[in-house]
Image (cartoon, grey):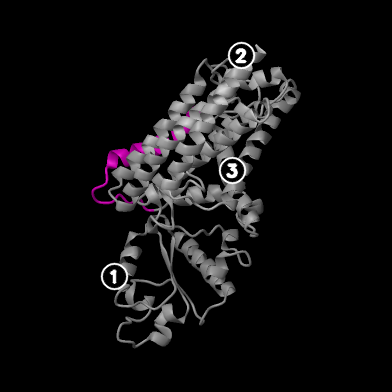
Amino acid sequence: MDPVSLLAYFVFPGYAFLILMAFFLEWLDRKTLAKIQDRYGPLVVGPSGLLQPLADFIKLLSKEDILPTGANRGVLTVAPILMVALPLTALFFIPMDGRRALVCFEGDLIAILFILIVMALLVFLMGWASANTFAAEGAMRSALQMLSYEIPLALTAICPALMAGSLCISNIYASQARAGLPFIAFVPPFGFLSFVVFLICSLAELERVPFDAPEAETEIVAGWMTELTGRRLALIRLGRNLSFLLMASLMASLYLGDPLTFRVAWLAPLAFVLKVLACAVLMSFVRGIVARLRIDQTLRVFWTYMIPLAVGVLLATKLILTLLG
Amino acid sequence: MVAALTPRFDLERFGALKVGSPRHADVLIVTGPVTRESRPRLIRIYEQMPEPKLVVAVGACAISGGVFAGCYNVCGGACNVLPKVDVVVPGCPPKPEAIIDGLNKAVEMLRKAGR
């Protein structure tokens, strides 16, 4: 490989950038939540607490590693590594430089949806392998939740792809620049509705408030993460930050393409990162203002409202595109 | 204790968060007298925490049993039950500033032990 592409893979927009962004997003999330609750949030470690997530990561790496009796060593060793590797893989399909992803092929949107399902299954496996009542309960809830959000998530992600006529995320992002408007503004209110459904499904996918029943700390200890300590917990937390980054950047690339910054070489990456941060702040904001739904309420929200809405938006998009020719 | 976590004193400034599972915890904060009922549970939670771990007893009740010391169902404070209590924060109730100071002292101890 030549030095330029090596730099692209390992520095920007490759591993180093993605992992730093993941830590930065955790800081942003904690700060946003603190602001909403009228607190300061992390303040002491590094400038305005910027290094807090990194400090937590290093601290967890140095903690004692406990494997409970009866837990499955294999699953609990491999799954945390996969929890980091899978979102990293998926992030390579995202056009982080605002132009073209490092890896892009026709159908990488489907590949990302597949990776998201595999991650949900890993969560289930990990909870089950922990040999703990709370972890098993969390795993059950997580599996139930997966059954409810995957369908509307996939259906709404297809809407921008329909407009672009492509299943490649870089092409979808570029087609919005060509069309002259982001998909979120596509024939109001359909583009916006699609965005809202996607946002709600992302929150469920990330197990964030209000869909954090699988790890509800006030009722089932820490859900499927209950028995994880030390390095395993460190990897899981990094993986969750990476998935947060993944969903935010997926949202930015599917819905927030724009013609203004796309053509300027230095502005495109900057604009894309800003869009990702805006999506992340939006998700943190929701976390600050709503309460947790029970798992049956989550299911009801998705099966009775989100799925029909997603199908409706998909049909409307197809119809409008056919009429406009 | 609640005051130390909420907006006015906000312990998260120092990076401290309340966690649900003892497996994720670094510091165990005992806030009341240890009764005969709660004693085995306290010991179990202590044993579930991964090393290195710290115990902070907050308030007179948690230190010695306070006004409940000598009751038929009270085994005294955390000091009587757990193998070690690293920091005690006296007071009835202790001020949030005192709790924050106690936690910072605990972190200091950990840092010294690491060297």
Q: Are marks 3 and 1 in contact (CB under 8 Å)?
A: no
The verdict on a common chain for dots 1 and 2 is no
Query: Which quadrant does the C terminus of chain A fall into?
Result: top right
Residue B73 lies, with reference to residue A190, above or below; the image says below
* Subunit bearing disc 3: A
Chain letter of the residue carrying label 1: B
- Is B109 situated above or below A100? below
In magenta, the rendered stretch is A64-92
Badge 1: few (under 14), some or many (20 or more) residues near its Cα, within 10 Å? few
The label shown at residue B40 is 1
Residue A103 highlighted magenta (yes or no): no
Indicate whether residue A90 is drawn in magenta.
yes
Query: Residue sitting at 48 percent across and 78 percent down?
Result: B59
Inspect the image, locate mark 1, and give the three-letter code of the amino acid beneath it.
Answer: Pro
Numbered tag placed on residue A283 in the rendering: 3
Chain letter of the residue beneath label 2 in the structure image: A
Rounded to the nearest angstrom, the CA distance separating label 3 from label 1 is: 41 Å
Q: Is residue A269 left or right of residue B46?
A: right
